[in-house]
Image (cartoon, coloured by chain):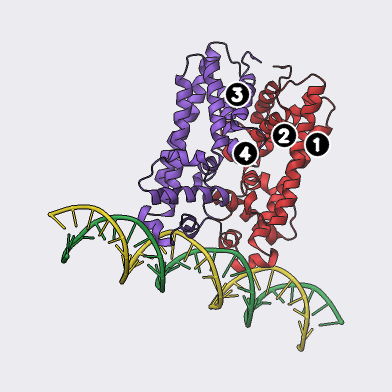
Chain colours: A purple, B red, C yellow, D green
DNA sequence: CGCATGACTAAGCGCTTGCTTAGCATCTTG
DNA sequence: CAAGATGCTAAGCAAGCGCTTAGTCATGCG
């Protein structure tokens, strides 16, 4: 029912019951959307009565916020790890796109919520998450800027190029399913090559 | 209130009132999402009482279906026009990406509904729209295949490359706003270049 | 003038929503 | 072994939902 990639994001939520509720919420939010999901759906899927949800979370929106914050933080970690892994912009970008893409394919369930249910977040949770999104985008921009400065990349507009890179990865969570023919890792490698070529990097086929 | 790109899609809905309701629905579905929009929202925005909606449309879902079908058909038209415009795969692809991207930027309101509210469609409307989506994807695949056959493109995997091309364009509707610094046309031209380079085409900077 | 017709509204029906309340077993602790 | 805390359920409340009903009013037509 709950996929391992989702489960791995919350290795030990405060209690077992809180964790079950949260994983049920992820599943339902991703499948039907936040507004189409009822608190009864979530509680029932977690094997409890509707009221049990409110012992562990103050509201339905708090569940969404928890999912969104954790998902965004995991994505930012991954992106910053790619930047820190080497000083070569080409390798930074390859690593970033590979792991970013793999993450959005394997974790497409959480990815859908993270990227498509932003507007349903309470205002202050939205603000916190928007900050994380900016830091992700800035990391990509920084790598591109360094690549251009070292004449490794060649792009008509750095901002637009950065948008294209993140956009390509994010959208994977919209269309990828377990039934897709390529594995998340294969897709990541392919996308890594495509992006490097898009940025005008010397190709190493 | 209603942007011109949206209005242009329904030049003459059956009556003035039906058109006002439809445009109000587009606005609200795009801003808040389908499930978060109430029939009262739509009717009020169109300057009518809640019941008036049901004189012109049989249900809230029928409004969504009308928007989704029309939006998908317009996108398919655009894609097929690009393929028919020339026999050179490079020019076909450039034209396709430019108009596809421009369309998703200028029409991001309808684009969001078309691409993000698919799951809310009644089953048979979904089936009709899924068919149109397949034809869009196939057109992109065809152009890539011809480009590869004529040694103009060079990609590791044609299916994945086609996915990347459509995905890049579709996602524009998620992030683009009127406040974005680049015009839809500028973005289209930039994306056209980026995609051609991604496909390994000879660049004409 | 009398009477259909069509666009619309006021009122509200039945149902579902997010969330609350009251109570009940089962643990933990002095 | 009493007393409180803990984790849960049964029941249900107020509000809001999609949609229906009954009726009003302007217009067109014999």
Q: Mark 1 points at which residue?
A: B81
**Disc 2 vs disc 1: Cβ atoms closer than 8 Å?**
yes
Q: Report crowding for label 4: few under 14, some 14 to 19, many 20 or more residues within 10 A (C-alpha).
A: many
Mark 2 vs mark 3, CA separation in Å? 26 Å
Instruction: Left or right? Give the position of B162 relative to A192.
Output: right
User: Taking D20 as reference, is A180 above or below it?
Assistant: above
Work out how far the residue at label 1 is from the one at label 4, CA to CA, in angstroms.
28 Å
Report helix, strand or loop for mark 4: loop
Residue B129 lies, in percent from the top left, at 72, 49
Residue at 56% of width from left, 36% of height from top? A106
Q: Which chain carries label 2?
A: B
Query: Looking at the image, do the residues carrying marks 2 and 4 touch, with CB atoms under 8 Å apart?
Result: no
Picture coordinates of residue A32, whole percent (x, y): 57, 52
Which residue occupies the foreground of this view, A182 or A165?
A182
The mark closer to the camera, 2 or 3, is 3
Q: How far apart are marks 3 and 4 (CA)?
A: 17 Å
Q: Mark 2 points at which residue?
A: B99
**Residue at horizontal 63%, vertical 40%?**
A175
Chain of the residue that carries numbered disc 3 in the rendered image: A
Q: Which of marks 2 and 1 is nearer the N terminus?
A: 1
| Residue at image mark 3 | A192
The quadrant of the image that shows the C terminus of chain B is: top right
Disc 3 and disc 1: Cα gap in Å?
31 Å
Name the foreground residue: B22 vs B37.
B37
Q: Determine the CA span between mark 2 and mark 4.
A: 25 Å
Disc 1: host chain: B
Tell me, yes or no, whether dots 2 and 1 are on the same chain. Answer: yes
Mark 2–mark 1 Cα distance, whole angstroms, equals 10 Å
Crowdedness near tag 1: few (<14), some (14–19) or many (≥20) residues, C-alpha within 10 Å:
some
């Amino acid at each position: 029912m709950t996929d391992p990639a989702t489960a791995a994001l919350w290795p030990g939520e405060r209690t077992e019951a809180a964790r079950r509720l949260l994983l049920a919420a992820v599943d339902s939010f991703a499948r039907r959307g936040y507004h189409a999901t009822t608190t009864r759906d979530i509680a029932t899927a977690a094997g409890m009565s509707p009221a049990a949800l409110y012992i562990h979370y103050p509201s339905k929106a708090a569940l969404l916020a928890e999912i969104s914050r954790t998902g965004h933080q995991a994505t930012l970690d991954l992106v910053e790890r790619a930047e820190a892994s080497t000083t070569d912009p080409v390798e930074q970008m390859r690593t970033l796109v590979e792991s970013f893409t793999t993450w959005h394919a394997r974790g497409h369930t959480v990815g859908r919520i993270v990227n498509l249910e932003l507007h349903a977040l309470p205002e202050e949770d939205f603000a916190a998450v928007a900050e994380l999104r900016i830091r992700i985008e800035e990391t990509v921009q920084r790598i591109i800027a360094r690549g251009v400065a070292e004449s490794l990349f060649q792009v008509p507009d750095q901002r637009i190029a950065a948008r294209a890179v993140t956009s390509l990865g994010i959208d994977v969570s919209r269309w990828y399913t377990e039934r897709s023919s390529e594995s998340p890792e294969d897709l990541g490698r392919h996308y890594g090559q495509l992006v490097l070529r898009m940025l005008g990097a010397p190709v190493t086929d």
